Amino acid sequence: MRKYVCSVCGYDYDEKDGDKSQGIAPGTRFLDLPEDWVCPICGADKSMFELEGGDEPAPAFAQPAANESVKGKNQDMKQRAIMISNLAKAASKQHNAPMASLCARIGAYFEQRNEASGDMKTAHQLLNEDISTRYIAAFNAAREAGDRGALRALTWGEKVTKIQANIINRYQKDGDKAFENDKIFVCEACGFIFVGEEAPEICPVCKVPRFKFNQVKRGA
């Protein structure tokens, strides 16, 4: 019997025990789990699990390869807008109103120059590029600098990016049916997205309590 570990939240599926919460009997192999089975903690699907004690990912559920051709000015503007927006939030939490206001105006400037374009396929490719290349480079730089704060932030960011890519992948396969009976919640602290009836008691990524989750409603 093997164990498979969720790369987003750390939950381990033990084939010996199964998953009582979703009616999976003890002794059920990971490869025999239903296609719609998801992590009972964070909602990630089987492609996000890795074999415990091994380097290989869970077989037959690998993510698509990154596509380095998806680049451009619009992506750069969007990244700048997001970065400045995050700085505005940080300044606000530090009660630095002038700096928060300045960053908000700069973020709005870049956002206005960000043309609404692209599709789910492009978004999925970009997220996978982040996972397969950019996070690796960022982790290496942070380790070389001995920056523990950066390593913590990158760990959160990588997990959030994985769940975003996972959710888009599910939507690409099943369309609106994938989430038609579920609600969508976003952690305001780290950006983790949870799909389900109610937000988790604590965020699987950054561990903040449930009240830090905001529900995203259709058409919002």
Image (spheres, rainbow, N blue to C red):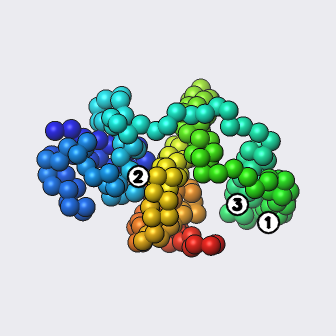
Q: What residue is disc 3 on? A: 89
Vertical side of 188 occupied by 168: above or below? above
Which corner quadrant holds the C terminus?
A: bottom right
Please state which amino acid type lies under the numbered disc 2. Answer: Ala
Instruction: Using the image as rendered, state which of residue 59 and residue 51 is in the foreground.
Output: 59
Residue 146 at least partly seen: no
Q: Nearer the viewer, residue 159 or 149?
A: 159
**Is disc 3 placed on a helix, strand or loop?**
helix
Residue at horizontal 62%, vertical 73%?
219
SS of the residue at dot 2? loop
Q: Position of residue 45 (x, y in %)?
A: 38, 50
Residue drawn where x is 78% and y is 46% of the image: 74
Q: Work out whether mark 3 precedes mark 1 in sequence or the reverse, and give the earlier one.
A: 3
Q: Nearer the viewer, mark 3 or mark 1?
A: 3
The residue positioned farthest toward the top in the image shown: 144
On screen, residue 62 versus residue 64, left or right, reads left
Which sits in the foreground, 54 or 25?
A: 25
Give the image quarter of residue 146: top right
Q: Quadrant of residue 178?
A: bottom left
Q: Position of residue 6 (x, y in %)?
A: 36, 46
Task: Check the image and report above or below for 104 versus 15.
Answer: below
Say which mark, if any, is on residue 97.
Answer: 1
Q: CA distance from mark 1 to mark 2?
A: 38 Å
Give the number of the mark in front: 1 or 2.
2
Mark 1 burial class by Cα count in 10 Å: few <14, some 14-19, many 20+: few
Residues at marks 3 and 1 touching, judged by CB atoms closer than 8 Å: no
Q: Residue 149's spot in the image, x, y percent?
A: 58, 43
Distance Cα–Cα, label 3 vs label 1: 10 Å
> Which residue occupies 32% across, 51% down?
35
Q: Quadrant of the N terminus?
A: top left
Q: Earlier in the sequence, mark 1 or mark 2?
A: 2
| Rendered location of residue 129, percent (x, y) | 59, 36
